[in-house]
Image: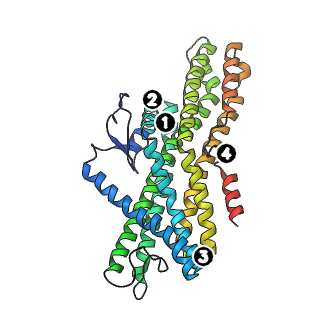
Amino acid sequence: MELGCSRHLKLPCSLHPIGISKHGNTLSELLIYFPAIPKITYAILAVLLTVYYYIYLCSITWFVFVRCPQTGDLAAASIVFSLGVSSEIGAIKLFIMYVYRAKLRDITGEYLQCEADMAPGRLRARVGRSLRTVRRRAFVYWLVLVVNAFAYDLMPAFLPGRHLSEDVFVIYGFEPMFESPNFEIASTLMGVSVVFICYTAGSISAFLIVIVGYSEATMLALSDEISCVWDDACASECQQPNDFIRARLGKIVAIHTKQIRLIREVEVVFRGALAGGFACVAFGLIAALLGGLENTFLQLPFCVIQISVDCFVGQRLRDANVAFETAVYNCKWEYFDKSNMKTVLLILQNSQKTMGLTAGGVAALDFTSLMTIFKSVY
């Protein structure tokens, strides 16, 4: 997954695409930079997209709505429909990122600027510790999807005889499927398409995990900062503790306000993709269960983990927001002067505007929504 960075920001990523690294404890280390993308890469991407859409959109549509009604094989239709719908989750996210690529460059640049503006100290160290968890979260998710793709592709190699990733599926124009050279070509095209869409879905979601995880880490760090503000003021050399508190609260307000705005911008960009993902997962799971678990057991993890991770990321962000709200209320504000009390009240009011992700601006992405989806499918 690659993403350009904003040109007008004085950042090291200027004019360079961005990828996700599995190393690093800061946002600027997690978002790695590449030189300009060669034109051959765009050509390869165009070929992969063409192959993917021919197999997993055009051919599946023909197979489900034309071929299966003629043969009356509803089980095969359910299996292949589940495969096609589930694979569209990554395609939808890729399309959304392409449409909003300029906006995402600006958002990424602003996140990096937030980190650059953060002075060394307890706040920055706390953010770094939380980002280590975010890094592991993103890498494990990406790894599971890619391993699932290779397992799906390699499974036929361990079965006796000639087998495809999905034996019941017939690619349009490749009949008979199990005779040379159709079999070899179909195996290659299906294998490449599966790896491509899993890699794409994993990389895009890893990007979302990292940037939302940075906001989560910042909110948790701000919780620690505001909890310790009175003790820090008493321990400081400042003769007027309220002056120290006023300066600290001003920084907290600025950081908190910016994180609220950035999460709203991220949510606006991804809400369509997340809503489409919810719909695809629901239909895909239903079709997979109708087709029989013995036929779709490798498709189910792909569906379940994608929607589960989106809901997990949204839930963690909401939990961080609640932790900050609790910390604001327990920050010993009763010892502050009236001016600082008003500032704390303002922060408390802002903290009650829950930060989170939604699917289409309707359903909040959290564990409640995840259980609702599973319950509805069941």
Left or right of residue 69, residue 136 in this image: left
**Residue occupying the far right of the picture:** 334
Asked whether the residues under the numbered discs 3 and 1 touch, taking CB atoms below 8 Å apart as contact, a structural biologist would say no
The residue that label 2 is drawn on is: 120
Q: Which of marks 3 and 4 is nearer the N terminus?
A: 3
Left or right of residue 364, residue 173 in this image: left
What is the x, y in percent for residue 48?
35, 60
Asked whether the residues under the numbered discs 1 and 2 touch, taking CB atoms below 8 Å apart as contact, a structural biologist would say yes
Please determine whether, in this image, residue 337 is positioned above or below residue 84. Answer: above
Residue in the picture at 68% in, 64% down: 377
Disc 4 is placed on an element classified as: loop
Residue in the picture at 56% in, 63% down: 303
The amino acid beneath tag 2 is: Pro
Please determine whether, in this image, residue 341 is positioned above or below residue 311. Answer: above
Residue 195 appears anywhere in the view = no
The amino acid beneath tag 1 is: Ala
The amino acid beneath tag 4 is: Val
Residue 368 appears anywhere in the view = yes
The residue that label 1 is drawn on is: 125
Q: Earlier in the sequence, mark 4 or mark 1?
A: 1
The residue that label 4 is drawn on is: 362
Q: How crowded is mark 2: few (under 14 residues within 10 Å), some or many (20 or more)?
A: few
Disc 3 is placed on an element classified as: helix
Residue 255 occupies which quadrant of the picture?
top right
In the picture, the disc for residue 248 is none
Tell me how far mark 4 sits from mark 1, CA to CA.
36 Å
Tell me how far mark 1 sits from mark 2, CA to CA.
7 Å
Q: How many labels does the image show?
A: 4
Please determine whether, in this image, residue 349 is positioned above or below residue 372. Answer: above
In the picture, the disc for residue 291 is 3
Asked whether the residues under the numbered discs 4 and 1 touch, taking CB atoms below 8 Å apart as contact, a structural biologist would say no
